Image: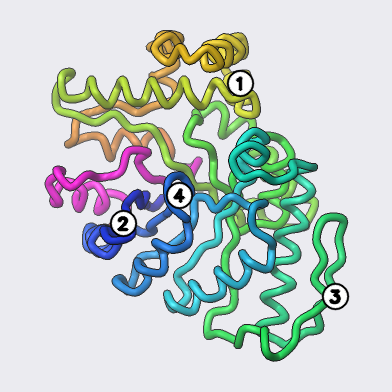
């Protein structure tokens, strides 16, 4: 199991953050699509690093065409000398329709088709195959020499997807190199829900389930005293309440018999009662969804929980500029040797 790190920095801060992540010994650096484009920071990271893998966790799939994803990934793979990982996610209906302003339809089958078309485009770029992809949502039947990207040294780009429900887990097992398990996760959810469905998808394609690597950003509450841990403890409660208020994430709550909490959280979210939402996250829920410990034993506690479940993980709250660099070097060394 490898330790990765999230990248949450403005573009001007990316070079220093990427170099620091590589020097600390993290295995991969993941950008997110929240307040920044997920692709742009990785170009800077590629320029200022040599070893660390670079991926999106995630790029929202549908606001961009498959060919747009394919070409951007192709350029980042070339720029990073083969270190790029394309991570895609559907996001939820409300964000697609009301934030990105696009039509929401059949997200699972549509993402499946997007993956197939992206790989068809890469085959065209590398091997000059004639584009002949025609699906229900996307079509790729034209590529002229003027517009075609050139072959690259490392044409096999891993594709990871994110998801929480039955279809997405099976799709990961069937087609993908990796699967982003949602940060709101537990041992029970991974072993009883995610892994069996990854295996079902892999069986459909005649693949080994281990060909689909599992990765996640996990909730970790570290500190050498209760007082030091308390601010992070409250932040994690807040994030759990936010995620659990979203209906598509209910399978995670259902796994533990907490399905009734989801509608109550949704109701408070609609009313803007953010404080009330946090109060619904019990200590039992926090114990299940997060790992708590002192700095000198937190790596062992995280490894104990997730060994055999995840191939890669990162701490949901990434290192800050105020953290001693040696602290994170020691934690990364515990995972990555």
Q: Label 4, on which residue?
A: 32
Give percent across and percent down for residue 42: 41, 64
Residue where numbered disc 1 is placed: 255
Q: Determine whether 32 is above or below 163 in the image.
A: below
Query: Residue at position x 67%, y 35% from top?
Result: 93
Query: Residue at 43% of width from left, 51% of height from top?
Result: 36
Rendered location of residue 65, percent (x, y):
69, 61
Q: Nearer the viewer, residue 220 or 62?
A: 62
Q: Give the image quarter of residue 250.
A: top right
Q: Which mark is residue 26?
A: 2
Mark 2, Cα crowd under 10 Å, few <14 / some 14-19 / many 20+, is many
Chain-order first, disc 4 or disc 2: 2
Callouts 3 and 4 close, C-beta under 8 Å: no
Task: Determine whether, in the image, residue 24 is placed left or right of residue 190.
Answer: left
Q: Look at the image and give the residue range highlighted in magenta.
A: 307-335
Q: Is 332 covered by the magenta stretch?
A: yes
Specify whether residue 285 is in view.
yes
| Local SS, label 1 | helix
Q: CA distance from mark 1 to mark 3?
A: 42 Å
Residue 194 appears in the rendering: no
Q: Nearer the viewer, mark 1 or mark 3?
A: 3
């Amino acid at each position: 199991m490898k330790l990765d790190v999230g990248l949450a920095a403005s573009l001007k801060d990316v070079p220093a953050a990427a170099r620091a992540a590589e020097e600390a010994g993290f295995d991969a650096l993941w950008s997110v699509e929240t307040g920044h484009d997920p692709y742009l920071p990785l170009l800077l990271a590629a320029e200022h690093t040599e070893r660390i893998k670079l991926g999106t966790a995630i790029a929202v799939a549908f606001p961009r065409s498959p060919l747009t994803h394919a070409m951007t990934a192709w350029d980042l793979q070339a720029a990073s000398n083969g270190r790029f990982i394309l991570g895609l996610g559907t996001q939820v209906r409300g964000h697609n329709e009301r934030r990105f302003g696009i039509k929401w339809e059949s997200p699972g089958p549509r993402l499946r088709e997007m993956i197939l078309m992206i790989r068809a485009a890469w085959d065209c770029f590398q091997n000059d195959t004639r584009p002949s992809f025609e699906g229900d949502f996307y079509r790729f039947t034209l590529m002229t020499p003027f517009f075609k990207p050139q072959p690259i040294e490392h044409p096999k780009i891993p594709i990871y997807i994110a998801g929480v429900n039955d279809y997405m887990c099976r799709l990961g097992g069937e087609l993908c190199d990796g699967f982003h398990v949602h940060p709101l996760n537990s041992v029970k959810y991974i072993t009883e829900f995610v892994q069996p469905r990854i295996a079902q998808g892999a069986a459909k394609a005649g693949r080994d389930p281990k060909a689909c690597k599992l990765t996640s950003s996990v909730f970790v509450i570290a500190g050498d005293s209760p007082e030091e841990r308390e601010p992070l403890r409250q932040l994690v409660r807040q994030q759990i309440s936010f995620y659990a208020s979203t209906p598509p994430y209910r399978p995670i709550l259902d796994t533990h018999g907490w399905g009734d909490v989801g509608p109550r959280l949704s109701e408070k979210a609609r009313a803007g009662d953010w404080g009330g939402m946090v109060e619904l996250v019990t200590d039992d829920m926090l114990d299940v969804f997060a790992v708590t410990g002192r700095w000198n034993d937190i790596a062992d506690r995280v490894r104990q929980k997730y060994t055999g479940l995840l191939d890669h993980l990162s701490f949901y709250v990434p290192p800050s500029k105020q953290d001693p660099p040696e602290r994170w070097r020691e934690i990364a060394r515990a995972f990555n040797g």
